[in-house]
């Protein structure tokens, strides 16, 4: 049997950035065996950690999907589908402060996350005000 050898290894800095964690938090979790694909490279206290990029990508996808299911959070595509709006209309309503959202991540890769309860409240407020909004059918 041939052992599995990762074809792309990331440093702790690269992995922490990708997962949106501090390096300290990442290394604490890796040390407890909670980050799949983590390898301690070298002997002793000064050994560096390396992370299997493919396993980290899979871990992030599963973590994000689990978080969405547990918290009821939606990305922009799911929010637009739920509201029957275009993504651009959802972004506009978010910028105007009419739809509550949380920014997930930093910089240009940050994404808006929407709670189903907040989207429902937006629809209720819209119907009370008599404003049919900017839905894709409007």
Image: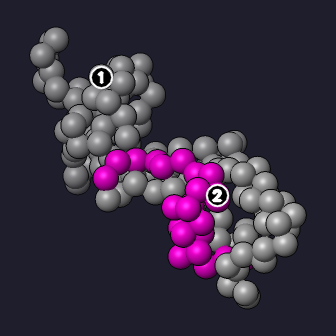
| Numbered-mark total | 2
Using the rendered image of the protein, determine whether residue 4 is visible from the camera's viewpoint.
no
Q: Is residue 69 left or right of residue 24?
A: right
The residue singled out by tag 2 in the image is 99
Question: Magenta segment range?
Answer: 84-107
Using the rendered image of the protein, determine whether residue 17 is visible from the camera's viewpoint.
yes
Who's the residue at 36% across and 20% down the image?
28
Provide residue 43's location: percent of width, then percent of height: 13, 17
Up-down relation of residue 21 to residue 110 (above or below): above
Who's the residue at 73% across and 70% down the image?
83
Badge 1 element: helix
Disc on res. 24: 1
Provide residue 117's location: percent of width, then percent of height: 76, 50
1 or 94, which is in the foreground? 94
Q: Earlier in the sequence, mark 2 or mark 1?
A: 1
Find residue 138 and report its image quarter.
Answer: bottom right
């Amino acid at each position: 049997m041939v052992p599995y050898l990762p074809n792309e290894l990331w440093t702790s800095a690269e992995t922490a950035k990708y997962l949106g964690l501090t390096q300290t938090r990442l290394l604490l979790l890796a040390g407890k065996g909670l980050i799949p694909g983590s390898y301690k490279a070298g002997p002793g206290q000064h050994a560096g950690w390396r992370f299997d990029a493919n396993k980290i990508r899979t871990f992030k996808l599963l973590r994000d999907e689990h978080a969405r299911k547990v918290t009821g959070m939606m990305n922009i595509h799911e929010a637009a589908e739920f509201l029957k709006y275009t993504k651009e209309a959802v972004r506009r309503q978010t910028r105007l402060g009419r739809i509550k959202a949380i920014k997930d991540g930093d910089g240009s890769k940050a994404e808006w996350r929407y709670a189903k309860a907040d989207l429902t409240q937006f629809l209720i407020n819209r119907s009370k005000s008599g404003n049919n909004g900017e839905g894709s059918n409007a």
